[in-house]
Amino acid sequence: MAANNPSVFLLSVNGQIEGANFPSYDDLYCKYCFVYGQDWMPTTGLEEGITQITCKGSQSSHKLIWNFPLDITFKSTNPSGWPQLVLSVYGPDVFGNDVVRGYGATHIPLTPGKHTRTLPMFVPEPTWRLQKFTSWLWGRRPEYTDPKVVAQGEGREVTRVCSQGFVTVCFNIIMKDMKKLGYDSGPSNSSNTQSYATTSGWSTDET
Amino acid sequence: RPTTEEAYNFFTLNFEPEPEPEESTSGKSQKQRKTGEDGGQEPEEAEEPSPEQSQDRVRCTLITWDGNGSFRRDVTCTSAGRKTGFSHLRVIVPISVKLPENVRPRYLEEEGLYVGERPTVTSTNENILENRILKMEEGAKWFGDDGRIIALPDPIKESSTRPPLFHMEDDLDPALQTVYRKVSCHHPYIIQSGGRYQLDVDVSGLIFAHHPLFSREHVLASRLAQLFDQYLSRQRNNLAEHLTDKLNGLRNTMRNMLEIHSELSLSQAMQNTRLLRDGEQEKDRMLLKSLIKVWKELKALREFQKFANTPYKLYLRRENVDRQSDERQYESDILSEVWELEAEGEVDYQSKLAEYKKQLGEWKAWKRKQRKKKKGQTQDETEEEDQEVSESEGPDEEGPPKPEPPEKLDFEVIKQQVREKASRIRRKPGEANLIPELTASGKISEAELCPRGELARREDVARRSVFIKILYNDKEVSQTNSRMLTSDFRVHFGEIFNLKIVNCPRSITLQVFEEVGSSCLLLAQVYVPVPHSSVLPANASIEEFEFSSNQRVMFDHEGVGSDVPLSFTAEGSDNVILLTSGKVSCCVSWGVDEDDVPLAPPMSQHPTLNAFFPHSGVGPVDAISHIGSSGDTKKISEWAMQSRLDPNDPKNASIMQLLKVASSGEVTAPDYFRLEQLQEEFNFASDEELAQSRRFRLLALRNQEVPEFRNYKCVPSREREVTDKVFQDYEKRLKEGEIIDTKEHLDSHRALVAKYLQKIREAVIHRFLLASHHFLLSDMVIEEEMPCFGILGLNLFHLAEPKRPLKPQRKERKKVTAQNLSDGDIKLLVNVLRAYDIPVRRSQSSMTSDEVFVLRRQVQVRPFVEVSFQRNVFQTTTADGPNPCWNEELQLPFRAPNGDYSIASLQSVKDDVFINIFDEVSDKDKDKGKTLHTRVEKHWLGSVKIPFSTIYAQSRIDGTFKVNTPAVLLGYSKERSSSNTGAYEAMQSLCQGAFITLFITIEPQLLPGESIREKFDSQEDERLLQAAERFERVAAAEFPGRPCTTTVVDLNGKTVFITRYIRPLNPPQELLAEEPQEATAQVARFVSLIPSLPDRVSFAGICDLWSTCDQFLTLLAGDEEEHAVLLCNYFLFLGKKAWLVIGTAIPEGSSAYVLTLEQGRYLIWNPGSGQYYGQYDTFCPLQAVGCLVNADNVWFNIQEHTSPMRISFDVSRANGWRPFFTRSFAHPGLSSVQPEELVYRHSDKATAVELQERLEKLLRDKLMEWRPHRPTRWNRYCTSALKHFLPSLEQGASGPGGNAGRDLAEGHRHELQNLLGDNRISGFPLHMAFSEMGPVVEAVHSTGVHTIQTANVEFALAVYVHPYPNNVLSVWVYLASLVRA
């Protein structure tokens, strides 16, 4: 494909799932996956992953640190269905059953540069109070049929959720050919775009 | 101040005269008093007031009734007895006192009337009240019939009905305080785009009619000025002159009319006009007089105070008149008036005279009557009494008074009156005409000449200034400069304010402020009406708006003040009170810009605005109207064309609107207002661009979830990369909707049916797509089932169980909703367990039976199973022998159409799972020396076809299936069990054929779509429907999972009772053979040949639709129910005892079969295949029986088991079958929905032949296509031979008996062998019902004949289509491969 007449644009996402803040839970691990529209396709990198189990350090301020790297590149023809990062955090309950501790999702930032996102996490609530008890007892908490539903709006109105904690993720975004396809994504001269200045070969305004 | 004593007396003293002594005694005491001698006397004595007591002593009588019946009367009469001062009032009042005399108390309650409960009052209080009331005037009227005080029922409820209020009074949160806001009924924006409207407010000046700082002279002067203004305006109107002219005109007309005929119709008008004229003349004269009077007063005042404050001067100009002519005119006027009056008087007189005469006549008549009566009295003495009566009545009916004759008007008197009047209201003849002229030419005296008071006033005036604030919609927008108040109290502003407005004008207010030093005082507010949009500066006139204020202002100097009495006379009478008042002259109009374009809002678009112009008189007119040609839109459009109006200019909006209306002929002016015009700003491409762009079209179609594009990935980013090819399929499908493709289908009729079904399917699928966007909680969240307490306990028990038990129990698999699946997630698991009775090979050459036996021992058959699904083929290992056991699991990937894994999509998957049994034939070539060639061939032995939709609906299929073996299998034969006798043999002959045991499921388990149980409308009796619902409910409660059907839905979507479908119906005449056995077989075959189309595919999961038999035969497609109903009806026609069996079967799941009773044996018919099974047949596909249906009743199976083998079909047994219609709820005689008779079209031989040729050609082409790398040779001899065989096969199949196929196979083999010699032949005929070409091709493909790799193979293919009535076609395909030995 001729470089000055591209048919797709590329979105490269580097970053890491830095850590989480779940005040009352420990020994958590995190699964991640990307949800994207029909016009998107991952070219390189891992679409899904699972982190190590982390327990809270004694000296740190109750933060769970994963520092799990993300590295994926998408190609797309259409900004609709912009990729979303979906996280789900699991950990053992008092009986040792693995239960879900939170779901969360965020869009990949739309502008090149370094971004830090804090994702609020939530879990679905049991329908009945008795179920709340039994699910606690057997460690079979209500779960989403698929973690990806937290990236969709459809059908969410039937669920009730309870907020849990926060996960911090940082992204380094590089884009290619967005502008050539006629999409202008955000500020090009803001302060948080040092990274693309260094990687000008991937920057948007390559002329 | 009154002393306490006085006050006490005031309240307690009895001012009324002494009441009767009875008044203060109870009823009982009264009675006693009457009997006792002195009891009555004593109170009277005691109650006699003594003069010294009357002032400060109160008569307090306390009479108490003690037990022994005597009175004790205490009279405490000292003023010291104040504490008990009211005690006398506590005495019980006897009823007799409270009621009128001689009236007995009446108790309404005792009469049975409801009186309600009286409010509770203590008896003491009541007594006090009663006593007090009685002392009042008319006190008795406070008492009711029962002698008690009239009282309304107690309004107080026992319990409070008002909800308790907490913290209401005291600390209401300030945030919760209610705030009053005015309802705004208009939209805040009047302007659709850009607020380019402007109001020009021109405040030109202010004149005070009265001001507190007026001096007396000013008061007079302003009065003079006002009078003069009045005079001027009267002069302008000149009403008197006008009326005089009118009068003269009337007089002339009158005269003319009198000449012609003596009608006096105008006299009334003339009279009125004259009166009006006289009034006006009088007013004119009075005005002139008062003008002169005020001027005189003013002059007097000026002289008196020796200075002048005002410059006014009144001149009276004399206009001399010609005395002679004036007098003449005057006289003639008077004369004519007198004449008129006389004439009127005459008329009046005449009418009065007539009245008088009439009255006189009456009077006379009465008089005569009286006289007559008197006469009668004297004549007849006997009637004296009567006469007396009449006499006594006489004065009552007073006779009419004697009428007075009317006076005739005296001419002289009239003349006198007229002259008097004229002298009063008119200028005297010859007197000069006085014309007043007011000028302001006088000189105001210098300040030095004025006294101190006046000086102070003038200084005060000089200190004051006036300004006006302009308020728009109650918001201050601007204010004028403050101007000094001048001595003439006129302020000139002359300022124009241009208000650029955005909001709809509601009010324009001018506030007049007076400024003294630094303090401001609001004098008055003037409300200015919002101008009509046609009011522009050019045509706006300055209007004067009066104002006044009622503030009281007083001064200690010469200023007269405001709201202060003021007198001009010396003695102070004739007071006037003057209030500050005046006039503001201003002018409000809509502005114009530099190009003289009015900046007014168009009226037509803003009906809300129109509400603000009620005063404009004329209704809201388009801005167009003042262009000059309202209504003539043609002219306007011409003008618009010439002047090249910019259509996008909002200023021209109203014109463009009008033109549009005129051109299109319809009124499109919206009566609402929305900000939608901004929508265009957001459109990133125009509609045309959107329509043209292929890329946008693709995106739009994908968004609409059009099946072809629903899962389209990566829409290209550039227009040119979207090729038209993408849309080809879609457009083709759209086109196909209209064009009927007769190539694919047999005839146009079938194509029409296919189209009809397609349409229904699309509608249903569309509904499902919509429904699939509604989620349930279970779609989103996986959650444990709500445990009940029993389970809870059990589960608690489970906690103690080991995690990995030694004997694990089967657990239900997790069910997965389809929404989150993608390609490759779903697998179809096929467990091939074993097979029975597989045909075995036959040796090619003719051998002796011994040799055959030996050969059989060596290799009978080496079967393996190949499962193909969605063109993926998997196979098992090869086993040995006719009863192989594989026990293998095959995993087949599943791919949903278009990658759409929604329930609706999965339900509409039409793919079938083909399970084919092959024989692996290895051919060892040893003749080429050292190399050993092993050629492996596979020969098709039979197949089982299971639709995916069945697997999906049932989630697993487990059972033994009959393998669909061809009637003739060249080179193979069924192995017979060695023992030829025994009971088992008889059964074996029944269930002839091979069988295979399978277990099929989907991994992960998919949730089958739940059928929506909608309430369909029905024409059935409501009672029947309720009974049906109850029946089904009870059945479901007792035997969950056992199918019970009483009502079904017909093609029109109406609920129909199931028995209405059963009715004997005639099969086609051709099928009715003489032998009943044969006819039965023929009919069953005919029914099985009608193509099957599962409802679940066509009407994805919604419900089963039952079509009637004629509909079924017309559509030529239906599922098991339709087949079963038709077969049942045919059997009934043939005179059999037949029932419809609702149950579950393999593989189709919930299904319908037919049960017949023949010679004491129950036979179960599979309507889809036309085969029948005995009740005790182990391989019967019917697994469970739910209920039986015939035309009269529905029986539900209440036996313990459901398997046909283990139940009794005797419906008369009450403990086995529960009937729907019982003796208590009898069959209401439901008529059938089926037609009386079925009409068939005769079989069409020509089309059958045509189809046969086409099929043959297609299959040949396909076979060659499937063998792309090898030549495909056709053996003509063999083909012709096969073609020859096929019709006999059809005959054999339709005939009865099972052994025919075997004999046929032998025959075919022999025949072919004779024909072709030494070739090794393997082949088979395929048979199916014809619906479309596709399934035939698929079936041929699945046999794998084309996969033979041998080099010198030849093929033979023959097709035969046998037509049955009504276009039911039976298709035979004979395939054979020949390998030269």
Image (spheres, coloured by chain):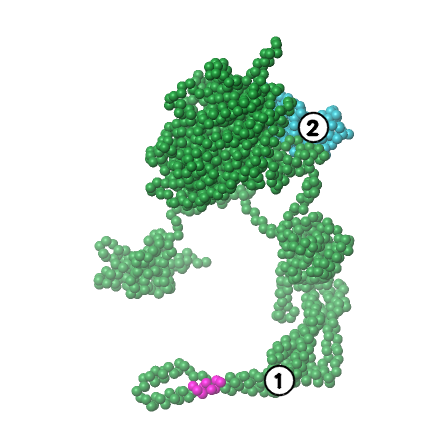
Residue B933 appears in the figure: yes
Q: Where residue B235 sits: x, y (%)?
A: 71, 72
Q: Is residue B97 above or below residue B329?
A: above
Residue position for label 1: B261
Q: Are there few (<14), some (14-19), or many (20+) residues within 10 Å of tag 1?
A: few
Q: Are there few (<14), some (14-19), or many (20+) residues within 10 Å of tag 2?
A: many
Q: Is residue B210 above or below residue A105?
A: below
Q: Which chain is green?
A: B
- At horizontal 62% and vertical 68% (from top left) the residue drawn is B575
Location of residue B15 (image quadrant): bottom left
Secondary structure under badge 1?
A: loop
Q: Which region is colored magenta?
A: B358-366
The answer to the question of whether label 1 and label 2 lie on touching residues, with beta carbons closer than 8 A, is no
Q: Given the image, on which type of amino acid does mark 2 rest?
A: Leu
Left or right position of B1130 against B595: left
Q: Is residue B990 magenta?
A: no
Give the numbered dot on residue A10. 2
